[in-house]
Amino acid sequence: DEHSTKTKPPRNAPSSLKSMLHSESLPWEHLTLKESNIIALETLSRLESNLRGASVAESTYTCLYAHDGVLLDMGKQLGFFDFQEKEEETSHNSNNNNTATTTNNISKGTKLAQICIFASSLSLVKLTETIRAIVMHADIYEEEDYSISSSSFTFCNFVREDLLRQVLKEALHMLQAFGREEEEEEERM
């Protein structure tokens, strides 16, 4: 119909941590543990929204950290995979102009906050992918509705299950070490 218009999202999905409008970036380089707690809770609310029936676009991908390009950028900066190899697999990210920050020059607290955001965002995407697979294989009529609303999403297909486990283990290990250090500090006072 010539009188109909296509609905366009208000902005393109982010392709990296620094790809936001007006050169603003997602909180990352100076991320605090308090900020990461808030972001992780928001990530959980996106998962809950998906489980309550919201579309993938209205739940999972309203978390800007959950987009493939941002996850790729975070994983690169945290050293979880070889960026050059993954860049070839995800050609849609070839237009990003980000430069990696070195994780060696940041505080332990910032590094912990970053890995927690990466782990929670990656988990959100992979759990959404698992939910989609379960619904697609279920013997109920609603799976058609769900599959249509989630069919165009790749769910970070360049991340295998073993990498997800590695990221989660590292995040838990760092959180435990941080907790022990905090307890030792309190005992010394």
Image (spheres, rainbow, N blue to C red):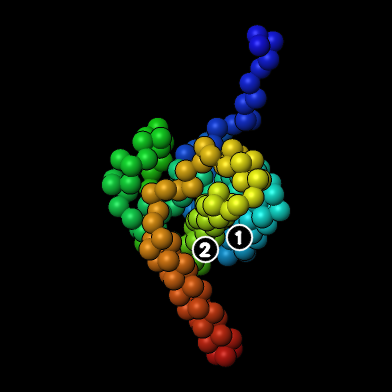
Disc 2 target residue:
116
Position of 103 with respect to 12 (left or right) is: left
* Left or right, 88 with reference to 187: left
In-image side of 65 versus 105 (left or right): right
Q: Is residue 185 visible?
A: no
Identify the residue shown where x is 62% and y is 26%.
8
Q: Is residue 100 visible?
A: yes
**Do the residues under discs 2 and 1 have CB atoms within 8 angstroms?**
yes
Q: Which residue is mark 1?
A: 40
Residue drawn at point x = 62 percent, y = 63 percent = 37
- Residue 18 screen position, x and y as percent: 49, 41
Label 1 element class: helix
**In x, y percent, where is residue 96?**
41, 36
Q: Which residue type carries mark 1?
A: Ala
Residue sitting at x 57%, y 90%:
187
Image quadrant in which you'd find residue 131: bottom right
- The residue lying furthest to the top in this view is 2
Q: Earlier in the sequence, mark 2 or mark 1?
A: 1
Q: Is residue 153 above or below residue 178?
A: above
Quadrant (top left, top right, bottom left, bottom right) of the C terminus: bottom right
Residue at 66% from the left image edge and 17% from the top image edge: 5
Position above or below: 29 against 115: above
| Residue kind at label 2, given as amino acid type | Cys
